[in-house]
Image: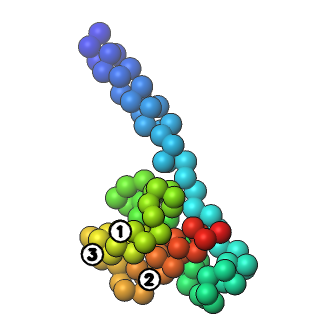
Amino acid sequence: MTNVAIWIVAIICLIDLSSCATTRFAPPPVTPDWSAKSDQIHLTMLREGRTLFVHRCIECHTLPAFWHYRTEDWPRIVDSMARRSNLKPAERDAIVAYILAARAQ
């Protein structure tokens, strides 16, 4: 009986966690019109930034929605995470560029 109760609680917890709104956030894909709105930042850099954001940031936590933080906070946030995740400076710059461009859309 105790094992069944533990399994039921575990399933309920998994269902509850999977319904969290932050896990449904999907970063927008980079489109050609982004470069015009992003002070001539190259689309390749923005696409790399998105890929890094999606694949490297999720290694430690769910992806944060861009609007949860102010534009001026993002460089500091990414800086602090870059040290933890061993991001190279160019990778860090690409992630920040992508986040700021996505916020501007």
Q: Position of residue 55 (x, y in %)?
A: 46, 66
Secondary element type, mark 3: helix
Any mark on residue 57, and which?
none
Secondary element type, mark 1: helix
Q: Say left or right for 2 vs 61.
A: left
Q: Position of residue 5 (x, y in %)?
A: 32, 16
Q: Say left or right for 83 vs 21.
A: left
Q: Quadrant of residue 59?
A: bottom left
Q: Residue at x 72, y 79 (%)?
A: 32
Along the polypeptide, which appears first: circle 1 or circle 3? 1
Say if mark 1 contacts mark 2, CB within 8 Å.
no
Secondary element type, mark 2: helix
Q: Residues within 10 Å of mark 3 (few under 14, many from 20)?
A: few
Along the polypeptide, which appears first: circle 1 or circle 2? 1
Label 1 to label 3: alpha-carbon separation: 11 Å
Q: Amino acid at mark 1?
A: Ile
Q: Nearer the viewer, mark 1 or mark 3?
A: 1
Any mark on residue 77, and which?
1
Q: Residue at x 35, y 78 (%)?
A: 87
Say if mark 3 contacts mark 2, CB within 8 Å.
no
Q: Residue at x 63, y 90 (%)?
A: 40
Q: Which residue is mark 3?
A: 83
Q: Is residue 79 above or below residue 45?
A: above
Q: Residue at x 42, y 53 (%)?
A: 62
Q: Which residue is mark 2?
A: 93
Q: Is residue 49 visible?
A: no
Q: Position of residue 1 (x, y in %)?
A: 29, 9
> Is residue 84 or residue 37 the one in the foreground?
37
Label 1 to label 2: alpha-carbon separation: 12 Å
Q: Amino acid at mark 2?
A: Asp
Label 3 to label 2: alpha-carbon separation: 13 Å
